[in-house]
């Protein structure tokens, strides 16, 4: 085992999901969007082993996939001779990724793409690794599960081989203090990684800006395998956290962000981001003069919302905020209807919109639409009995809902050994 440790370190990292407040889909056409991280995270535990294979364990997908390292080496030797595009085709064939790939095969493709890219120079000495990925984010729901998955893999692999370093924040002998989900703790115990739970040098840490940029670049590449033509907003917010304003591949952190409470509603209607983006593309190409102004209107919502959010953030305690919240509710409603007009609505999202509007809240889809999740803004002091009532009614309709705060940390290392 000592020899294995010399090559790679064990690491535990996590990355958050996101909500797009406004600007989804329009952002693919170079318009501005605003996104924030949510307090639901994806976790990755990577353990070097002397088993002779790479094992990917995805409890959320009931998948455990093992590849002998000899096969991966063969794959790499084929790849080096081809062009980038040929290389990708070889990898796709290896993972059975065809025209309509399954979620499982895409999850494997992303892992192997990043692993062969980041660890290719370690292949000669690699003796085996187990990679467990567990996520609190429902997949295919608009909360950026694919981005958080890719960010965790990129950060975990770069950290385990020492390509990037963790700036340790605090020594802490009890990993439970990092609020790891019970599922991860159980796995850690089962694997006999007791050292992880008791090790006095365990720590959590952040990455330097240039390392975050590298994680962002690689996770963006991985997102293109899942989405085709992602704008890059999902991976950026998962890497950097907080709230960002994103346009044309570049983003700015929004410093003046009020603390907002959001009701997240999961319709449980599964959809695929790539198909939703393609649906808008078809409409746009067929009716450019109709669709373009709708995308411009969505951008205007983003800009207006940015101004209102900044005003809210600068209010002193006790100053009236009703009008500002009322404007935000209007913007949510208009955005909901515009997203319907560009073909990414769904009956379930309309139902959520209707039910929340009955108690005076506005909701809109977040992410790619076509099902997935909706968000409704809850103003401070909003009637808790109204809220419980609507949550009950949403549940009766088969939806799941929970209140969540936004903002918070981007990718983090929890432990490295
Ligand atoms: N916990 C997980 N385990 C394995 N794969 C995952 C996990 N979470 C996400 N994925 C990958 O992400 C893909 C789903 O991505 P998709 O972009 O369609 O939805 P999303 O990211 O949840 O929503 P959006 O992109 O609208 O925010 C799955 O096919 C799978 O490859
Ligand atoms: C629908 C979309 O705008 C957001 C998906 O979370 C696609 C993208 O920006 O890549
Ligand atoms: Mg996605």
Image (cartoon, grey):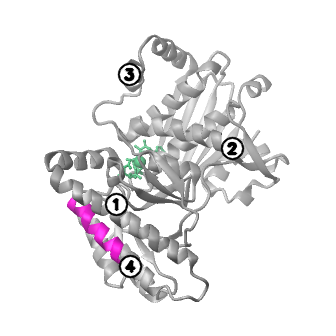
Discs 1/2, front: 1
Whole-Å distance between the Cαs marked 3 and 2? 31 Å
Q: Earlier in the sequence, mark 1 or mark 2?
A: 2
Describe residue 278's horizontal placement relative to residue 385 as left or right. Answer: left
The residue to which callout 3 is attached is 85
The residue to which callout 1 is attached is 299
Q: Within 10 Å of the Cα at label 4, are there few (<14), some (14-19), or many (20+) other Cα atoms?
A: some
Is 231 drawn above or below residue 265 in the view shown? above
Q: Earlier in the sequence, mark 2 or mark 4?
A: 2
Secondary structure under the numbered disc 1 in the rendered image: helix
Q: Within 10 Å of the Cα at label 2, are there few (<14), some (14-19), or many (20+) other Cα atoms?
A: few
Q: Within 10 Å of the Cα at label 3, are there few (<14), some (14-19), or many (20+) other Cα atoms?
A: few
Q: Does 32 appear in magenta?
A: no
Coordinates of residue 306 in the picture (x, y in percent): 45, 67
Name the image quarter holding the N terminus. Answer: top right
Query: Which residue is depicted at the point 67% across and 52% down?
Result: 185
Whole-Å distance between the Cαs marked 1 and 2? 32 Å
Secondary structure under the numbered disc 4 in the rendered image: helix
Coordinates of residue 267 in the picture (x, y in percent): 35, 64
Whole-Å distance between the Cαs marked 4 and 1? 16 Å
Is residue 345 among what the camera can see? no
Whole-Å distance between the Cαs marked 2 and 4? 38 Å
Q: Are marks 3 and 1 in contact (CB under 8 Å)?
A: no
Look at the image and give the residue range highlighted in magenta. Answer: 330-342
Is 102 drawn above or below residue 90 in the view shown? below
Is residue 19 among what the camera can see? yes
Q: Within 10 Å of the Cα at label 1, are there few (<14), some (14-19), or many (20+) other Cα atoms?
A: many
What is the chief secondary structure element of the magenta stretch?
Answer: helix
Q: Residue 208 — which label?
A: 2
Query: Which residue is depicted at the point 35% across and 60% down?
Result: 268
């Amino acid at each position: 085992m000592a020899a294995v440790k010399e090559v790679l370190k064990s690491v535990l990292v996590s990355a958050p999901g996101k909500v797009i407040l406004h600007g989804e889909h329009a952002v693919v056409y170079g318009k501005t969007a605003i996104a924030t991280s949510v307090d639901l995270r994806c976790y990755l535990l990577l353990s070097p082993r002397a088993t002779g294979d790479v094992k990917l364990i995805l409890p959320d997908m009931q998948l455990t996939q093992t590849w002998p390292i000899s096969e991966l080496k063969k794959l790499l030797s084929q790849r080096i001779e081809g062009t980038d595009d040929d290389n990708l085709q070889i990898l796709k064939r290896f993972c059975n990724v065809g025209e309509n790939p399954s979620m499982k095969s895409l999850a494997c493709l992303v892992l192997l793409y990043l692993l062969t890219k980041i660890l290719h120079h370690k292949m000669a000495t690699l003796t085996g690794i187990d990679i467990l990925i567990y996520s609190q984010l429902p997949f295919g729901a608009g909360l950026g599960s694919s981005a958080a998955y890719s960010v965790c893999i990129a950060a975990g692999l770069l950290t385990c081989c020492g390509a990037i370093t963790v700036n340790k924040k605090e020594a802490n002998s009890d990993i439970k203090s990092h609020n790891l989900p019970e599922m991860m703790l159980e796995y850690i115990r089962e694997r006999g990684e007791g050292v992880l739970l008791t090790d006095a040098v365990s720590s959590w840490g952040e990455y330097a800006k240039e390392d975050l940029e590298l994680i962002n670049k690689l996770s963006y590449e991985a997102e293109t395998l899942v989405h085709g033509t992602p704008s890059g907003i999902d991976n950026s917010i998962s890497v950097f956290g907080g709230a960002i304003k994103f346009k044309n591949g570049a983003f700015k952190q929004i410093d003046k962000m009020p603390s907002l409470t959001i009701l997240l509603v999961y319709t449980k209607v599964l959809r695929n981001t790539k198909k939703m983006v393609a649906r808008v593309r078809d409409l746009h190409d067929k009716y450019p003069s109709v669709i373009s102004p709708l995308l411009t209107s969505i951008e205007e919502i983003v800009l207006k919302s940015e101004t209102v959010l900044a005003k809210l953030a600068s209010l002193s305690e006790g100053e009236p905020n009703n009008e500002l919240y009322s404007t935000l509710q209007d913007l949510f409603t208009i955005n909901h209807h515009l997203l319907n007009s560009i073909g990414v609505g769904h009956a379930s999202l309309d139902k959520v919109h209707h039910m929340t509007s009955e108690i005076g809240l506005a909701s809109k889809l977040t992410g790619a639409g076509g099902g997935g999740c909706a968000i409704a803004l809850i103003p401070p002091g909003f009637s808790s009995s109204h809220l419980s009532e609507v949550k009950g009614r949403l549940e009766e309709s088969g939806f799941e809902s929970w209140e969540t705060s936004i903002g918070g940390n981007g990718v983090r290392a929890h432990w490295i050994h």
